[in-house]
Image (cartoon, rainbow, N blue to C red):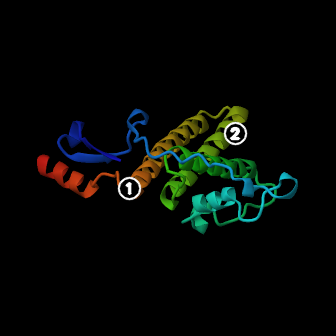
């Protein structure tokens, strides 16, 4: 999030906005996981307590039931949205792993994970409505699909930023946002 000066009718009033993609913080990449000879047991299979399993457990630390799943309900058998929700669950898992690896220092916390879950659901509904529009020719569905796609994009940018900021704060490189907001409100009466 960043503070921006308002424009138009909100001129002079500071606004908190999601940063554009080219201004996102770099974050902290995860260390490459070196493999240890003790990671593999008989016949090359993973041994109990291997370092890769520990790293996976560390990456999932702090997750909750609500952030680990896309929803708490189960869809009925044959629900037409079911394959889209399943794809959204896969997307969320892959995106959280990528955020942890690339900007989260090996961790994607519950906050960024919940934002990614919202992005995944918005993307799934976008694709579902797009497919319905393709078969029905309904222009309104096309517009709803496009808006949901844009919502997903904004959520992904916010998740990237939050994950990166959490990683930099864990390493002591973060900014003091309370001081930043206080400064912005003093300079913009």
Q: Position of residue 81 (x, y in %)?
A: 71, 50
Q: Position of residue 44 (x, y in %)?
A: 83, 52
Q: Is residue 189 visible?
A: no
In this view, the residue farthest toward the right is 43
Query: Vertically, is 29 above or below 47?
Result: above
Q: Which mark is residue 186?
A: none
The residue tagged 2 is 132
Answer left or right for 175 relative to 155.
left
Q: Which mark is residue 169?
A: 1
Query: Vertically, is 45 above or below 18?
Result: below
- Nearer to the camera, 110 or 172: 172
Q: Residue 57 falls in which quadrant of the image?
A: bottom right
Q: Residue 23 falls in which quadrant of the image?
A: top left
**Secondary-structure class at tag 1:** helix
Answer left or right for 171 relative to 106.
left
Tell me which label, 1 or 2, sits earlier in the chain.
2
Q: Position of residue 62 (x, y in %)?
A: 54, 66
The residue at 23%/53% (across/down) is 181
Answer left or right for 15 relative to 84.
left
Q: Position of residue 165 (x, y in %)?
A: 40, 51
**Secondary-structure class at tag 2:** helix
Answer left or right for 35 relative to 8.
right
Q: Residue 171 falls in which quadrant of the image?
A: bottom left
Q: Residues within 10 Å of mark 1 (few under 14, many from 20)?
A: some
Q: Residues within 10 Å of mark 2 (few under 14, many from 20)?
A: some
- Nearer to the camera, 85 or 169: 169
Please identify, in this view, whether the residue under mark 1 or under mark 2 is nearer the observer. Answer: 1
Question: In whole angstroms, how far apart are the C-alphas of marks 1 and 2?
Answer: 44 Å
């Amino acid at each position: 999030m960043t503070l921006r000066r308002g424009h138009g009718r909100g001129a002079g009033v500071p606004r908190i906005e999601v940063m554009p993609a080219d201004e996102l913080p770099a974050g902290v990449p995860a260390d490459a996981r070196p493999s240890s000879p003790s990671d593999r047991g008989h016949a090359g299979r993973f041994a109990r307590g291997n370092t890769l399993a520990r790293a996976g457990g560390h990456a999932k630390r702090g997750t909750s039931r609500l952030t680990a799943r896309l929803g708490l309900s189960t869809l009925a058998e044959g629900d037409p949205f079911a394959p889209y929700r399943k794809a959204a669950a896969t997307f969320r898992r892959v995106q959280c792993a990528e955020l942890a690896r690339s900007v989260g220092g090996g961790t994607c916390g519950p906050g960024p994970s919940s934002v990614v879950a919202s992005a995944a659901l918005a993307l799934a509904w976008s694709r579902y409505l797009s497919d319905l529009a393709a078969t029905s020719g309904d222009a309104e569905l096309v517009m709803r699909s496009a808006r949901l796609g844009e919502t997903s994009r904004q959520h992904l940018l916010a998740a990237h930023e939050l994950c990166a900021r959490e990683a930099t704060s864990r390493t002591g490189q973060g900014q003091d946002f309370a001081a930043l907001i206080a400064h912005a409100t003093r300079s913009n009466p």
